Image (cartoon, helix red, strand yellow):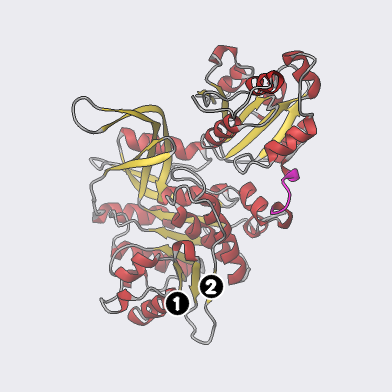
């Protein structure tokens, strides 16, 4: 299966406000003796591209080609942002570094997988005339099919520059998609599509119309208020999104959202704008474009922090049999490298016996998936388990274990290995992240040296106490009563 923009090789130039999104994962187990406030113990720090940079990341990982053109500070945060972009295969050559500008950073603090607090480090600085010209000149040198303006109101897209960029794109016959911000949409005139959410649409209208909660009415009101606006896509959260075409003779298209377990809505708007921009570069219908955007947004809200959707995730979500079966996730070890192809996302790898799947396994795999964009789980074969655990194991044969692990939504691909360790399998796919339980020392983890030589990271995750296959087997054998509890 190919996505439309993979067939047509669509290139999107993304311009707008970039920032670094930082996640501090940890736990809260006590109150500070200094004041009645919780003490957050940081376990892991993750940094991701945010704002317009996340929109570019969505374009790239979804299978398109992207240029990111923006202004960042010549500071350490800017360097971290550029490193995060390069890790996703996005060039930082078109980022203009300006001093003494400070790169925006948003820090989200999580405890037990719940967001506690967001801390913003930002100072809004509108680009001066020289910086605007430098940014425009950079865009002028690039060839692109679609211009995506990702406006967060931080000063990178002042009205004069926005108007010039739209004129540049339209003069070349390129499409223009805008993810808008602010109270005045006039400077987005002549864009092919704008994608406000409900609050953004209301802010751009007068007080009476702003009371409207109907997406189609808001879209029509925007077109009347700003006569040079064209199509409008109003995103409405759990109610879905509605596409309002400029021509009143055409019918608006409502795309309802799919039932999802919403974990974090951060970056969902970036995903919708990015996928609609990719769709704008293809000869596909509005209905098909909205279907793709809806699938992408639904996948992103299930992730923690600011995340992007990958081409592989979209294809699986779009596949009709994906709703009914997870067997397509099971890949033979000799086919695993080919299945991954040229995946540009951050690949996470872990392995184990997974004999009698339990809550500890699920919690571990969910945390492992949060470390990247695609999680591969490799299982010991039956003979490998027997050599490791004794002749009485495994309890569950390999094919059943594969099916059970593949059924978990946090797992992207499942394979197996016959050897005592998965070192050969790891070497064949070169994952960026290798994860094991905290009961392992890094130097003892099979394949750690391989991953580290390739510049990847090896990390351990605390295990859910009171849960283990061995303990379950012992309880059954001993005839113990009661359920396994979390001590």
Residue 326 magenta: yes
Q: The N terminus lies in which quarter of the figure?
A: bottom right
Q: Nearest the camera: 357 or 48?
A: 357
Residue displayed at 49% across by 51% down? 262
Q: Which mark is residue 434?
A: none
Q: What stretch is highlighted in magenta?
A: 323-328
Q: Name the residue furthest left.
A: 34
The residue labelled by disc 1 is 216
Local crowd size for mark 1, using a 10 Å CA cut-off: few (<14), some (14–19), many (≥20): many
Judge from the rendering whether residue 430 lies leftward or rightward of residue 257; answer left or right. Answer: right
Residue displayed at 59% across by 23% down? 451
Residue at mark 1 to residue at mark 2: CA–CA distance: 9 Å
Q: What element carries label 1?
A: helix
Residue 246: image location, x then y, percent: 47, 80
Q: Which of marks 1 and 2 is nearer the N terminus?
A: 1
Residue 53 magenta: no
Residue 228: image location, x then y, percent: 38, 78
Viewer can see residue 402? yes
Q: Is the magenta stretch mostly helix, strand or loop?
A: loop
Q: Name the residue furthest bottom.
A: 249
Q: Are marks 1 and 2 in contact (CB under 8 Å)?
A: yes
Q: Nearest the camera: 461 or 218?
A: 461
The residue labelled by disc 2 is 254
Residue 39 sits in which quadrant?
A: top left
Residue 486: image location, x then y, percent: 51, 27
């Amino acid at each position: 299966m190919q996505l439309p923009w993979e067939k047509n090789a669509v290139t999107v130039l993304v311009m707008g406000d970039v920032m670094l999104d930082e996640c501090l994962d940890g736990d809260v187990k006590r109150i500070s003796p200094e004041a009645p406030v919780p003490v957050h113990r940081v376990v892991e720090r993750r940094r991701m591209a945010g704002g317009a940079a996340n929109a570019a990341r969505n374009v790239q990982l979804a299978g398109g080609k992207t240029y990111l053109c923006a202004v960042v500070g010549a500071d350490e945060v800017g360097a971290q942002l550029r490193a995060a972009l390069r890790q996703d295969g996005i060039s930082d050559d078109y980022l203009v570094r300006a001093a003494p500008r400070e790169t925006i950073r948003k820090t989200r603090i999580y405890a037990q997988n719940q967001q506690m607090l967001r801390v913003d480090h930002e100072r809004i600085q509108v680009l001066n005339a020289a910086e605007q010209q430098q940014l425009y000149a950079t865009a002028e040198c690039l060839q692109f099919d679609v211009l995506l303006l990702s406006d967060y109101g931080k000063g990178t897209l002042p009205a004069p520059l926005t108007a010039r960029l739209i004129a540049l794109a339209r003069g070349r016959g390129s499409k223009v998609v805008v993810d808008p911000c602010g109270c005045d949409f006039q400077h987005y005139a002549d864009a092919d599509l704008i994608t406000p959410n409900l609050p953004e649409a209301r802010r751009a209208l007068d007080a009476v119309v702003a009371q409207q909660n109907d997406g189609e009415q808001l879209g029509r009101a925007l077109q009347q208020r700003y006569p040079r606006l064209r199509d409008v896509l109003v995103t409405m959260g759990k109610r879905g999104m509605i596409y309002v075409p400029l021509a009143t003779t055409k019918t608006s298209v409502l795309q309802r959202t799919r039932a999802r377990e919403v974990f974090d809505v951060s970056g969902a708007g970036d995903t919708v704008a990015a996928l609609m921009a990719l769709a704008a570069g293809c000869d596909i219908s509005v209905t098909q474009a909205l279907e793709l955007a809806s699938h992408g947004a639904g996948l992103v809200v299930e992730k923690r922090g600011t995340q992007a959707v990958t081409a592989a995730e979209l294809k699986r979500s779009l596949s009709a049999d994906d709703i009914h079966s997870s067997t397509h996730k099971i890949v033979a070890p000799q086919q695993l490298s080919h299945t991954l192809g040229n995946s540009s996302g951050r690949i996470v790898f872990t392995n184990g016996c997974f004999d009698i799947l339990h809550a500890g396994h699920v919690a571990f795999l969910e945390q492992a998936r949060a470390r990247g964009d695609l999680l591969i789980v490799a299982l010991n074969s039956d003979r490998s388990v027997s050599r490791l655990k004794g002749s009485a194991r495994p309890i569950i044969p390999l094919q059943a274990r594969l099916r059970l692990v593949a059924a978990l939504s946090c797992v992207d691909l499942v394979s197996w290995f016959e050897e005592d360790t998965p070192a050969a399998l790891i070497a064949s796919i070169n994952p960026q992240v290798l994860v094991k339980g905290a009961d392992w020392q890094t130097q003892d983890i099979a394949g750690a040296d391989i991953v580290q030589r390739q510049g990847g990271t090896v990390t351990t995750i605390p295990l859910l106490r009171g849960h283990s296959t061995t303990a379950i087997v012992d309880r059954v054998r001993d005839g113990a009563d009661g359920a396994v509890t979390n001590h």
